Structures are given as structure tokens and as C-alpha cells.
Image (cartoon, rainbow, N blue to C red):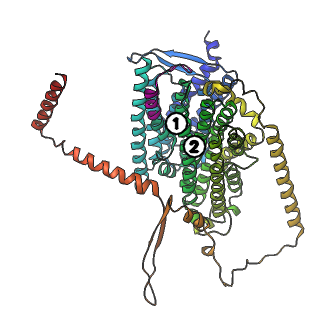
Amino acid sequence: MHSDVLRDPAVLVLIAILVTAFSGVPGLLIRGGATGQRLATLGAVIAAFLGLHSAISLLLAKTTTTFVIAWNLPFDACEIGLDPLSLFFLIPIFIVFLCGSLYANGYWPASSHRSSEPALTFFYGLLAAGMGLVVVARNGVLFLMAWEIMALAGYFLMVIEHDKEEVRRAGTVYLVAAHIGAAALFVFFSLLRLHCSSFLFPGQGGLHIVAAPATALFIAALIGFGSKAGLMPLHIWLPSAHANAPSHVSAMLSGVMLKMGIYGLLRFFSFIADRPLWWGVVLAVAGLVSAFLGICLAASQRDIKRLLAYSSIENIGIIATGIGVAMIGQATGNPRLALLGMVGALLHILNHSLFKPLLFFCAGSIIHGTGTRELDRMGGLGKRMRWSALLTLGGAIAISGLPPFNGFVSELFLYLGFFGEARANLPYVVLGAPVLALVGGVALITFVKLYGATFLGNPRSQQAAHCHEAPLSMLAPMGTLLGLCLLGGIFPQLLLPLASPLLATLTPVVSGTASQPLPLGWITMAGVAILGLAALLAFSLRHRVSALPKATATTWGCGYLRPSGRMEYTGTAFSEILTSLMSGIVRTRVAKAAISGYAPPPAAFCYAPEETILERLLLPLFDIVGIGFAFCRRLQHGQAHIYVLYIFATLLLLMLWIH
């Protein structure tokens, strides 16, 4: 009997989550040496293979399994369940957790990080397990518990280098933002409990409430889940947190944890069958605004990890846009638009979970080899870091939405929805296409800047001149993710079956449309043709270069006798025109010393991009709120007789109100 239970794929998924949670425990008990980290990596391999195989098999079979766990808390039954929506989000959790655990052996080895590695490894597994528990929870209180485990594990991972003031500040901002979002979720689940008379989640389309309560639920969900996803203007914690965390932690935060906010929104939408049209409009507009502002802010950054963090806001915006378009299609009775929007959003969830961890791993490889995150201090790394350069190039192409990689496929579905299905009766939806095209253009500029300023040209600093390639333990996970990106771009038929089981839950109107053919065959042919053409061109160029006589000479230096790397265009210079055009969104703070006299002393020049929305709008608002709290703080002065007076006054007011 026990052997039959252990062969159940649903049980194996839950076992995989438990193994993930305890994978870092041996490292806390075995001090000194790499044994604990190796055991944690072995646990990650076992959990990932168990979880991925079982989750994919259950998802393809469209199976739903529910378990009830005995507990003594007065919050209804402790129910966990595995349905297509949960199984879909478990896939990126296990993939990124496995790759990040392998990557950490070279990036954050126990031999050189003896004081921090055990805690980092433990909380890395706890973060992945917390996210796994979030997606399988079917009780509001259990969901909030898992949500808090995820939030706190993420915090301890971010501040692992707590001796740095910048890291501590980023952790504090994250913790405050996380608990503001959690407060909104407390409101959300309290309202849900009020209308369902239970903390258990309602079934698919089982929530039928009038407009005003539904609006309150939508606003609370948008704030609570949107803050975790990083939708603007709820994104304030994201750039500094992702920039200051270790690179494999940033990969988990960006590639997976942001998707927990998307999961929460999709889970809420599955409760309500008849969603108002304006919900879809709000979500689509918020997604387009986040995508555009996020990529504009990314283009102005000189910190490679902060650039990738802002790019995550862009991609979350694309996902939110697809969900909003699907809701518009459902509310207006356009099943094809609903299908294209939801499929595009779901595929982009998977795609972003592959190419964004890849790019954060590549950033970690660059930082590991140079010791700096500043793009303007790099250059010429491609000569010494050939594998990292190749992998970064593939990730940059994928995130820019270009074929033959997977980012192209998911964005293509959104374009097809905008142009093909919205012309007849929804002309205003077509306006999303030029915005999405503009986002794609700026993304291309951004990642040309990232790759060119990092790997091309000559070194601009001693760190870049003496860089070294990452070890195999770091390159292997990066290569795995790049291979998956290429596979998903050439054969989207492999990814579509993973998204299809969710359509009946999220967009019931497409039940008769899901079987209609989508343009997948020609995507495969185009991808194969592009790969073949690229291989042919590379072979031709290599053959032509090898046939030429070998000669060496310096590049013409525009008349300068001793050109140096300081004369090259930096990443900041490359994006200066775009940054100036977007000056209302992002500005550059410049600090420079005055130069005077015939022989002026050395002067320092410092510049940093400034986010206008955060620093000119949100932070002043927080200052005003802080003044109000400072006044309230005066009420707490430690004098007991005054506290007794407060209690008496409160009781008197309550008696008068009841009377």
C-alpha cells in the first residue's frame, strides 16, 4: 500500500517540495567544508527531477488532486491541491531551483564563503519550498503562512552580505514593501472569507458577488499581488533588491518569485467566471505602462544587475498585458482574442523564467570574473570570457523578443491578438501594438548596450583587463537554460501543451477555440532557417578570414598618438540620446567639482540615473506619511498613568457609541 502511495505523482510532487525545504539543513549541521553544499545540491537534483517529471505528467493528463491535512487551527480544513494552474507554476520553481543550486557551487562556494554559505543555501531551499507551498495551498490562512515564509526567506537571502549599508537598505525597503502587500492580502482574504463563509478557496467560477464587493476584492488583489509581481508603481523594492542580492538569488527572485504575484492574480480570476470588462482594461493598461517605463529605466542603468532588474518590470508588464487582453476578449465575447492573450501571457511566464535567470547567471559570471557591476568599467571581456559572451548573447536575443529564441514566440501571440482579432469590434485594443513595438525597440537598444559595453571593444579598467572565465559549475546551468530557450523558440509545440490545460480554468470562453490552429509550424521553419543561415554565415566568414594573410596593426585613433580604453564609448554614452528623450521618466544626477586655474587639481565626476517616479513622487509621499507617524509616536512616551487615561477615554467613547 505504501509503495502505491509513493508511486502517485501528486505525492511525489509534495515530497519534492519537502526535499527542497530541507535541502539546506545538512549544511547547518555540517560545519567547515563543502559537504553540506554538495548534499544540498544533491537534494536539489532529486527534488527537481521528482517534481518536474511528476508535475509535467499530471499537467498533461489534466489531473486535479486534493489532500486534506489535519491541523488544530480554527481556520477550516487545511487543504492543499494540485490542479493545472498549480502544476504550471511548479515547473519554473523546480527548474530555476535546480540550476541555481548547481550554479552556487562555483559562484558562492563554501570554501571561500564559510560564514555565509550555510545560511544562504538553507534559505535558498526554503524560498523555493515556500513558493511551492504558495501554489498548492487551498486555504487562505495556509496561503498567507506560505506567503510569509517566502517573503522572509527572500529577505534573509537578500541581506546575506549585511555588512554593506546598501544591502541593508535594500533589505529594509523590500521588507516594508512585502508587508504592505501582505496587509492588502489580509484584506483580500478577509473579504473572501466574508463572502464564502470559509477560508477554503472557492471552486472554478464559484464566486458570485455583486459589483461593489467584487471591486474591493479586485483592488486588494491588485495591490497585494501586484506589489510582489513588481507592477508599477508598486515596484519600489525590486531594483535595489535584485541588484544587491547574490546573482543566483536574483535569478530566483526575478525568474520565479515575481511570478507568485501573477499566480495570485490568476488564482483570484479563476474564482470569478463573469469578470467585468474594466478589470481587463485596467490590467492591460497597467501592464503596458509597466513594460514601457520599466525598459526605459533599464536602458539608462550602468549597473548590470539593476538593468536586468528593471527589465524584469518590463517582462512582468508584458505578462499582465496578455492577461488583461484575454480578459477583454472574454468580456466582449471574442474567444480568439482571449485565447491569444492568455496563451501569450502563459508562454511568457515560462519563457521569462528561463532567459531572465540565464541573464542573471551571466551577470554573476561577469561579476565573478571582474569584481565589478559597473558596465562603464568593463569592455573587451569577450576575448577572455568566450563562453560567457556566447551565453549572454543568446540570453540578450531571447529577452529582446527576436527569433529563433523563445521570447519571440510569446510576444508574437500578443501581436496576433492586437492586429488580427481586435480590428473588427475592438479597435482601441490595436493601440497596444505600437506600445509593445516601442517596448521591443527600447529592449533591443538596452541589450545591445549591455552586450557591447561588456564584451566588445577594449578593457576600460584593470578589472576588465585581468578578467577570467567562470568555472564549469557556473557555465553548465547557463548552457542548460540557453538550450531550453532555443528549444522553446524553435519548437513552441512543446510548450503549448503545458499552457493548454489552464485555458478552461482561466478563460472558459475559449473552450471551443483552443483547438483552432495556431501559427506554430512556420515558427519552427523560420527558426530552423535562421539557425541554418547563421551557421552558414559564420562558416563562410571563418573560412574567408582563415584564407587572408595574418597581419596586426592598431586601429586608427582619430589622430591620437596613444588611444586608450578611456576614449571608447561607454554604455552610458551609448544610451545618452534615448535617456535624454525619456528625461521625464528617468533623469541623471551629476556631481562634479568646479575646475579653475591654470593647473587645476584632480577633480571627481559622478553621475547616477534617477528614477523620477520613485524619487520625485513616491518618496516625498512617504515623507509626508512619516511626518504623520512621527506625530503619533509622541503618544508612546512610557508614562503609565497617561496610558491608563488612554484606556479610560477609549472605553468611554465605545460606551457612548454603543448607547
- Residues under numbered marks 2 and 1 in contact, where contact means CB atoms less than 8 Å apart: yes
User: Could you tell me the amino acid type at mark 2?
Assistant: Ile
Determine which of the numbered discs, if any, sits on residue 325 in the image.
none
- Percent x, y of residue 626: 30, 49
Res 543 → quadrant:
bottom right
Magenta run includes residue 465 = no
Residue 288 seen in the figure:
yes
Residue 42 seen in the figure:
no
**Which is nearer the eye, 406 or 101?**
406
Residue occupying image coordinates x 60% and y 53% = 363
Q: Residue furthest front?
A: 425
- Work out which quarter of the rendered image holds the N terminus and state it: top right
Give the side of residue 154 with respect to residue 502, left or right.
left
| Residue count near mark 2 (Cα–Cα under 10 Å), binned few <14, some 14–19, many ≥20 | many
Magenta region: which residues? 202-220
Res 50 → quadrant:
top right
Determine whether the residue tagged by mark 2 lies in a helix, strand or loop: helix
Q: Residue furthest right?
A: 547
| Residue count near mark 1 (Cα–Cα under 10 Å), binned few <14, some 14–19, many ≥20 | many
Residue occupying image coordinates x 59% and y 22% = 82
- Read off the residue under disc 1: 261
Q: Residue furthest bottom?
A: 598
